[in-house]
Amino acid sequence: MKDMKHYCDVLIIGSGIAGLTAALAASDAGLDVIVVTKEPDLRESNTFYAQGGIVCKGVDDSPELLTQDILSAGAGISNPEAARILAVDGPRYVEEFLINTIGVPFSRSESGELELAQEGSHSRRRILYSMDTTGKAIEESLVKKVRQCGNIRILEDHTAIDLLTIPHHSTNPLSLYMEPRCIGAYILNNQDERVERIFSAYTILATGGLGRIFLHTTNPVCATGDGFALASRAGARLINMEYIQFHPTSLFHRDADGFLISEALRGERARLTTRDGAPFMDRYSPLGDLAPRDEVSRAIYEEMIKRGDTYVYLDIASFATIDIQKRFPAIYEKCLSLGIDIANEPIPVVPAAHYACGGVYVDARGRTSLKNLYAIGEVSGTGLHGANRLASTSLLEGLVWGMRAVRDISETFDEAKSYKESDIAAWIYPDKEEEVDPALIHQDWLSIRSTMWNYVGIIRTFKRLDRAKADVGYLINRTNEFYRKARLNPLLLDLRNGIQTALIVVEAAFRNRKSRGAHYIA
């Protein structure tokens, strides 16, 4: 089979706000860029489905106030430097880049002023939004701009298999004495199932989250933990992987598939109630319905267990003073399509896996522990989120570190190769490739997601975590054995990454004996 090769200055794996921000910044710096996404549509990402908003500077606000809110939500282990960077740089990039350069259509008042919302654990109204489809507005604006850039090549429908690294992928035995580094990636062309190589001076992981390793999640189907697994196999350091934030309110309906009910509803005075209509959050937190997400999720869980219910209600109809249909049109229409009129009745909700607070360890410039490999956005572990992410900081983190990573690359750019390309092994195909059975893939995913939800969910015990280690460990061994002799396809690669990421989360949770934030041990 023909060995297809690509070359670039910067390879970006992922196409959400972090990846596309980095692509545009690198393009502006005159660098040759390749953006890879496993989806047929460049827009498909966690960013596209983000509802609530993105932090900017509010009235009577300051970097110090935002920093304190981030640190408070992070339950004592947020990185103070990362929080300060976000609080200082974030609002400036939102204005200069998203509004003035990209032209994201954020919601404005009749007088033309940007409207600001407030969400849980924020001390000020400082959230910019575009109705309840903020992520879509940002993503579509970025994609439009990226497609106009001549020095950005886009490889849609291409799945990253593994990062190319030295010395691991070098056939030269003397490369063992070189400093380990990333030099690109093996990529599967999903259409013809051919493996291609991309050689890059620098590689940026911007692959998003891992919510799909859980049975209930607000994440889209693409969030299978790819970047965490890619980095782990390459030897990069990961941190805080036990801290998985569960969003308190996903729509409870058999046809909803984890549809997110934005925290912004509670920012507009919606209240959580039991099925008989009694508000309950005041009994769990002095912040009531605006408590941090981990506290709200556990409160809902406890109310469901106590009462034997399978869901609670989020009631905006009885408490809000806004035009619900106008403020939350996408949520209104989605619920109405399922027979729920949120302007006149409460919304049935349950918690669902939402965000990975940890990730691939990076410094203030987005550099991982592996030379020439960067990580930005949800896949990264800046330390910003600590044990529990503050609402609406995730899009901002992707924006800020997308900019910072490319600034570091452009300031230190070195295209000199410390290796011979002929020493880097082409992909080796099995002599006899076994076909992938989609039914078996589906069953393995069901096993992973059920195990993670039941044993590594909102409330954990060490007995459950020990069981999860054994069950996921068995699955990963079986999958890796099949992977070595199978014909590669995207379904198998997603499963391989999902299982490895699940094991990373389980082992991190098992090692941590202290309840904190989103990691709660009963």
Image (cartoon, rainbow, N blue to C red):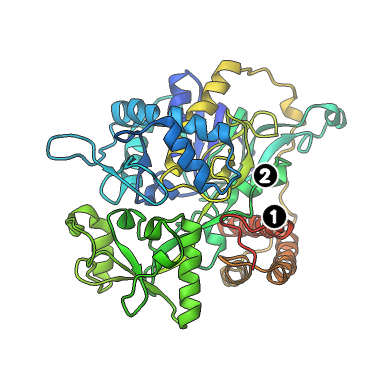
Quarter that holds the N terminus: top right
Residue 49 in the image: above or below residue 250: above
Residue 75: horizontal and vertical position, in percent? 56, 49
Residue 193 in the image: above or below residue 71: below
Question: Looking at the image, can residue 248 be seen?
Answer: yes
Q: Is residue 179 left or right of residue 342?
A: right
Q: Residue at x 30, y 57 (%)?
A: 265
Residue 253: horizontal and vertical position, in percent? 37, 73
**Kind of residue at disc 1:** Ala
Residue 277: horizontal and vertical position, in percent? 31, 76
Q: Residue at x 71, y 67 (%)?
A: 462
Q: Residue at x 47, y 33 (%)?
A: 86
Q: Nearer the viewer, residue 1 or 417?
A: 417
Question: Looking at the image, can residue 16 be seen?
Answer: no
**Outermost residue toward the left?**
110
Say which quarter of the image contains residue 480. bottom right
Looking at the image, tell me whether mark 1 or mark 2 is earlier in sequence order: 2
**Badge count:** 2
What residue would you read off at disc 2?
Answer: 238
Residue 173: horizontal and vertical position, in percent? 87, 32
What residue would you read off at disc 1?
Answer: 508
Residue 206 numbered tag: none
